[in-house]
Image (tube, helix red, strand yellow):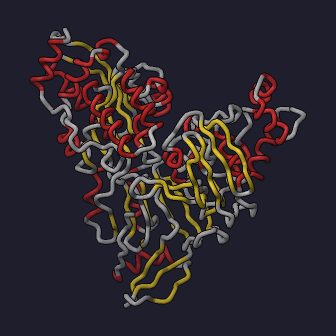
């Protein structure tokens, strides 16, 4: 794993006073450093959380807060492999049956035991239509969960699904206290005026049918209310308070099953303006910031009181998508022509200031199936003109590109507008507010669009299926409305194949087809966009954009 360097500078003592004055100082180690545990660690982010419920909105800012509160059966290691967390052991019994032995020494923040019933309740809640979770598709392959004993569960999938352990590491797989889940359902049932208990509702859900559908519809507007106000997991921090638009505060969970966190509290502070976040870091009002405009990196790198991290890339990408069902873009020659006009290296340097690395296809270097020999469509205006002529558009055409208000995306849209004039494409740029934008491109109102995609489980299925399988068109993730029979077939084979070498070959074929078809132009794999005060030690940032604060310390240098 990647760690921030543990730097301490005596000259910063004045700046540190405000940050560490309430901390408990431990004895100096052999290097003359003292680890300052306790106190409030302040982390500033550009966006607020939309939900503290694992069944809530599927957005990164929420995942980053929930990550300290909840745990699943697995986590993802630095090699993008699943490693056991709340699972003590597991085996794949047959193609569609998995058995998981759970840890028997784990407590929820409310003092109740983590066990098989809690796992079953949490996963079944995600896919419950009454909850209407936007993340239900993460576990759509699960057919049933059987509790074999207090700490053993059997999971049966509808079809072979090789990446199940990876998917159980998804934030949606965070286990919630069964007591709180029961309270949440009972609250929704009571508010709907239904004469039943939560257990009776669960029985209806297991049976299905018209009576269950009526009950689910009746309680749907109130599910999640209790969990949102009282998020209870098994994570190393437990919920303390939330002020929407301002902060989420969590505190150390002293009964954590592993070594408890070093810090006493962690404040996720919302600072929307980029330069204000940097000022927070420079003045010591924040120990860590997430979300840095690429143009500001030099300001941070040249500050001796700030530590940045090089060479750590998120398992995510930034891409220009094209609506393959709409007008001229239904012709792959037009899509190829546009791709030939995109100079990825120039965008990397001019827009992203070198922060990140260019991508040839949809898969990152760290992910199974990445093909280092994949040949991308190079920047070639002459070939682009030829393709436009072959497609019958030598006289040009009018297209529209949509984007939201991320500065780099606006810059790319304007750059493309200028470049595409050379091949006769008049590109209109339309900038929309995030919610409106997402709805518009999910409805197919666009010609081109610019978006990012994080692979939250480190598996190629999650990097490709949502974006390119025909069943995921629109809100599911496939906003290119790409429909390719061969790609569908390969993706279906890939998620069912258990041999990793064979899976890798399947995904290499998919990436080759995507380069040929060009439903999307993958531009950049982002570098980690965060920085910390130099007194911050042992911060594990990882590849999934969810920093681990469990071992983080604040340090001072003794003279």
In the depicted structure, whether residue 273 falls above or below residue 221: below
Query: In the image, what residue occupies the spot 59% across and 64% down?
Result: 236
Image location (x, y in percent) of residue 142: 61, 38
In screen coordinates, is 143 left or right of 516?
right
In screen coordinates, is 368 left or right of 456?
left
Image location (x, y in percent) of residue 414: 26, 30
In screen coordinates, is 45 left or right of 68?
left
In the depicted structure, whether residue 349 falls above or below residue 215: below
Q: Quadrant of the N terminus?
A: bottom left
The number of callouts visible is 0
Query: In the image, what residue occupies the spot 36% across and 14% down?
Result: 326
Q: Is residue 243 shown to the viewer in this render?
A: no
In the depicted structure, whether residue 496 falls above or below residue 539: above
Image location (x, y in percent) of residue 286: 46, 64
Query: Which residue is at the far left?
Result: 382
Query: Which residue is at the far right?
Result: 195
Q: Nearer the viewer, residue 164 or 124?
A: 164
In the depicted structure, whether residue 309 falls above or below residue 196: below
Q: Nearer the viewer, residue 539 or 404?
A: 539
Query: Which residue is at the far front?
Result: 94
In screen coordinates, is 288 left or right of 48?
left
Query: In the image, what residue occupies the spot 19% across and 8% down?
Result: 392
Q: Is residue 513 shown to the viewer in this render?
A: yes
| Snapshot quadrant of residue 530 | bottom left
Q: Quadrant of the C terminus?
A: bottom left
Image location (x, y in percent) of residue 200: 85, 38
């Amino acid at each position: 794993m990647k760690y921030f360097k543990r730097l301490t500078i005596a000259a910063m003592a004045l700046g540190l006073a405000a940050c560490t004055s309430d901390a408990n100082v431990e004895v100096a180690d052999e290097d003359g450093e003292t680890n300052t545990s306790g106190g409030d660690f302040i982390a500033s982010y550009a966006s607020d959380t939309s939900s503290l419920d694992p069944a809530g909105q599927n957005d990164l800012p929420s995942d980053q807060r929930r990550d300290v509160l909840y745990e699943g059966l697995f986590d993802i290691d630095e090699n993008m492999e699943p490693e056991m967390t709340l699972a003590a052991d597991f085996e794949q019994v047959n193609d569609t049956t998995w058995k998981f032995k759970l840890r028997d020494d784990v407590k929820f923040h409310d003092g109740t035991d983590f066990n098989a019933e809690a796992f079953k309740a949490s996963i079944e809640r995600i896919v419950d239509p009454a909850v209407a979770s936007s993340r239900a598709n993460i576990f759509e392959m699960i057919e049933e969960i059987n509790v074999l004993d207090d700490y053993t569960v059997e999971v049966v999938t509808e079809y072979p699904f090789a990446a199940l352990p990876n998917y159980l590491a998804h934030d949606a797989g965070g286990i919630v206290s069964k007591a709180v889940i029961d309270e949440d359902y009972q609250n929704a049932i009571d508010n709907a005026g239904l004469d039943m208990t939560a257990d009776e509702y669960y029985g209806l859900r297991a049976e299905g049918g018209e009576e269950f559908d009526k009950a689910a519809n009746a309680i749907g507007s109130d599910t999640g209310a209790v969990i949102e106000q009282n998020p209870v997991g098994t994570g190393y921090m437990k919920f303390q308070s939330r002020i929407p638009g301002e902060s989420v505060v969590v505190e150390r969970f002293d009964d954590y099953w592993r070594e408890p966190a070093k810090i006493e509290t962690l404040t996720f502070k919302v600072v929307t303006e980029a330069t204000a976040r940097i000022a927070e870091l420079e003045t010591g009002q924040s120990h860590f910031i997430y979300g840095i405009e690429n143009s500001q990196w030099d300001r941070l790198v040249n500050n001796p009181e700030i530590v940045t991290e090089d060479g750590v890339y998120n398992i995510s990408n930034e891409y220009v998508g094209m609506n393959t069902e709409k007008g001229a873009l239904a012709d792959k020659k037009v899509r190829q022509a546009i791709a030939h006009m995109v100079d990825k290296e120039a965008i990397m340097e001019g827009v992203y200031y070198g922060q990140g690395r260019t991508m040839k296809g949809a898969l990152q270097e760290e992910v199974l199936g990445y093909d280092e020999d994949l040949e991308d469509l190079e920047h070639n205006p002459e070939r682009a003109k030829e393709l436009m002529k072959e497609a019958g558009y030598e006289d040009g055409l009018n297209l529209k590109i949509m984007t939201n208000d991320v500065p780099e995306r606006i810059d790319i849209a304007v750059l493309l507008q200028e470049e595409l004039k050379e091949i006769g494409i008049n590109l209109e740029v339309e900038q929309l507010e995030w919610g409106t934008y997402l709805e518009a491109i999910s409805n197919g109102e666009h010609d081109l669009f610019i978006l990012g995609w994080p692979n939250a489980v480190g598996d190629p299925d999650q990097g490709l299926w949502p974006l390119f399988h025909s069943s995921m068109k629109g809100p599911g993730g496939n906003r290119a409305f790409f429909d390719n029979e061969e790609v569908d077939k390969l993706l279906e084979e890939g998620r069912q194949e258990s041999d990793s070498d064979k899976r890798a070959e399947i995904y290499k074929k998919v990436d080759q087809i995507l380069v040929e078809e060009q439903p999307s132009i993958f531009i950049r794999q982002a570098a980690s966009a965060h920085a910390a005060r130099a007194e911050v030690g042992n911060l594990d940032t990882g590849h999934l954009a969810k920093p681990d604060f469990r071992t983080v310390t604040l340090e001072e240098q003794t003279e």
